[in-house]
Amino acid sequence: MNPKTLERFGLTKGESKVYLALLRIKKSTIGNIIKEANVSNSKIYDILDRLNKKGLVGVITQNNKRSFEAKSPEILKQNLEEQEESLKEKHEELDSLLPSLKGMFDSQEVKQEAELLQGLKGFKSKTEAMLNDLEKGDTFYILGAPKEANEKLEGYLQDWHSRRIKKGVKCKILYETDAEKWAKKRKKSPITEIGFLPKEIKSPTAVDISNNYVAIIAFEETPLVFTIKNSKIAKSYREYFELLWKIAKK
C-alpha cells in the first residue's frame, strides 16, 4: 500500500511509512522498523511517539528492551470520527461568534481611497457608486449645484433622482442662484429639499456627499471628478453642508 493513502487520514508521510511497516512485520525493535520503513534514525523515536499518542502503535518493554507493535487500523476510523466531532463543535462555536465578529468588522472605519475620473462616464460611475452607498432613509447632499451641470446632464440626472426616490434616499441640494430653473423643477420631487447659496458663492464645481464618499466635480468642457472614500471626511463635509444650509435661502 502506498503510504500517501494514509496521509489523507491525518498521518504524516513518516507516520504512514512506519505504521505500514509495523503492520507487515508485527512486533519489532527500532532497528527493524528503521530498515523496513526506510526512515532516518533521528526521526524514528519522534514518529513512534506520535503514533503511540494516536493509539496506532503500542510499546512493549521486556528485559529492559523496547519493542513496538501496530494496533488495529480501526483506530484510524475512531480518530477520524473524533476529528469530525471536534470540527462540528468548532463550527457551532464559530456560528455563535460570527455575529460579534461581523459587528466588529462592520464597525471598522472605511479604508480611504481616492480616484480621479473624467468625462460623462466618469461622472455617472461616481454617482451610481454613491447611490449604492446609501440605504432607505439616508440623505444624499449636493453642494453648489451649478447651472452647467443640469444643462449637460438633465436627462441622466432626472433618471438618477427617480431611482433615488424609489430607493427611499432623501436629498438636500444647495443650488447656485443662476440655477433657479432647475431648482424649481427638482423641488417638486418627493423627499427632496432645495436651498440657494448666497450670490457671492459661485463656482463651476459641485460637491456630492454620501455616507462614505465625497466627490468634487468640475463641470468644464469635459467633467472632472475627484472622489474620496472615507467616512470621517464625508462626515466633516456633511457638517459643513449643514452650516451652509442654515444660511441658505429656501
Image (cartoon, rainbow, N blue to C red):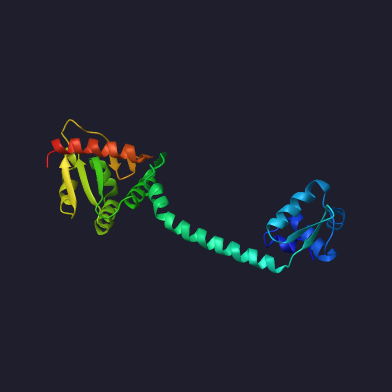
Q: Residue at x 41, y 41 (%)?
A: 111
Quadrant (top left, top right, bottom left, bottom right) of the N terminus: bottom right
Q: Is residue 184 left or right of residue 32?
A: left
Camera-side residue: 39 or 121?
39
Image position, residue 130 (x, y; %) = 33, 48
Q: Residue at x 60, y 66 (%)?
A: 81
Q: Residue at x 36, y 49 (%)?
A: 129
Q: Could one spot residue 175 in this view of the protein?
A: yes
Q: Residue furthest top?
A: 200
Quadrant (top left, top right, bottom left, bottom right) of the C terminus: top left
Camera-side residue: 213 or 7?
7
Q: Is residue 151 left or right of residue 75?
A: left
Q: Residue at x 39, y 55 (%)?
A: 99
Q: Is residue 132 left or right of residue 63?
A: left
Q: Residue furthest bottom?
A: 74
Q: Is residue 192 left or right of residue 31?
A: left
